[in-house]
Image: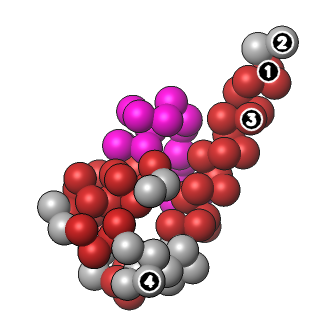
């Protein structure tokens, strides 16, 4: 299970987000029952657990699990490259 899926399960307390057949990687999270408060909490969890910063502008572009996964992977790679 992806990191974002794990965080969504933790956040919502439901296994629905663990199953990619129930909630696909490209399904808009708001359409799958995640409200704006949950999205803010998700961003905070991602920042804490993945160690990446997500700005308000970034949040506007992050709509799906795949968006979050790509964002975290890109920021993690950029951070690793910046330490060299």
- The CA span between labels 4 and 2 is 39 Å
Other residues around mark 1 within 10 Å, as few (<14) / some (14–19) / many (≥20): few
Q: Which residues are magenta?
A: 44-60
- Look at the picture and state if 31 lies above or below 14: below
User: Does the magenta portion include 84?
Assistant: no
Q: Which residue is mark 1?
A: 82
Helix, strand or loop under label 3? helix
Q: Which residue is mark 2?
A: 84
Q: From the image, which quarter does the N terminus lie in?
A: bottom left
Other residues around mark 4 within 10 Å, as few (<14) / some (14–19) / many (≥20): few
- Residue 39 visible (yes or no): no
Q: Are the residues flagged by discs 4 and 2 in contact, CB closer than 8 Å?
A: no
Q: Are the residues flagged by discs 4 and 1 in contact, CB closer than 8 Å?
A: no
- Look at the picture and state if 73 lies above or below 69: above
Q: Which residue is mark 3?
A: 77
- Look at the picture and state if 63 lies above or below 11: below
- The CA span between labels 2 and 1 is 6 Å
Other residues around mark 3 within 10 Å, as few (<14) / some (14–19) / many (≥20): few
Helix, strand or loop under label 1? helix
Q: Are the residues flagged by discs 3 and 4 in contact, CB closer than 8 Å?
A: no
Mark positioned earlier in the residue sequence (3 or 4): 4
């Amino acid at each position: 299970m992806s990191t974002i899926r794990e965080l969504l399960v933790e956040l919502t307390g439901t296994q629905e987000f663990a199953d990619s057949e129930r909630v696909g990687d490209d399904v808009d999270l708001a359409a799958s029952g995640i409200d704006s408060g949950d999205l803010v909490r998700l961003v905070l969890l991602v920042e804490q657990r993945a160690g990446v910063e997500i700005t308000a502008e970034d949040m506007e572009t992050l709509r799906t699990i795949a968006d979050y996964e790509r964002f975290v992977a890109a920021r993690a790679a950029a951070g690793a490259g910046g330490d060299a």
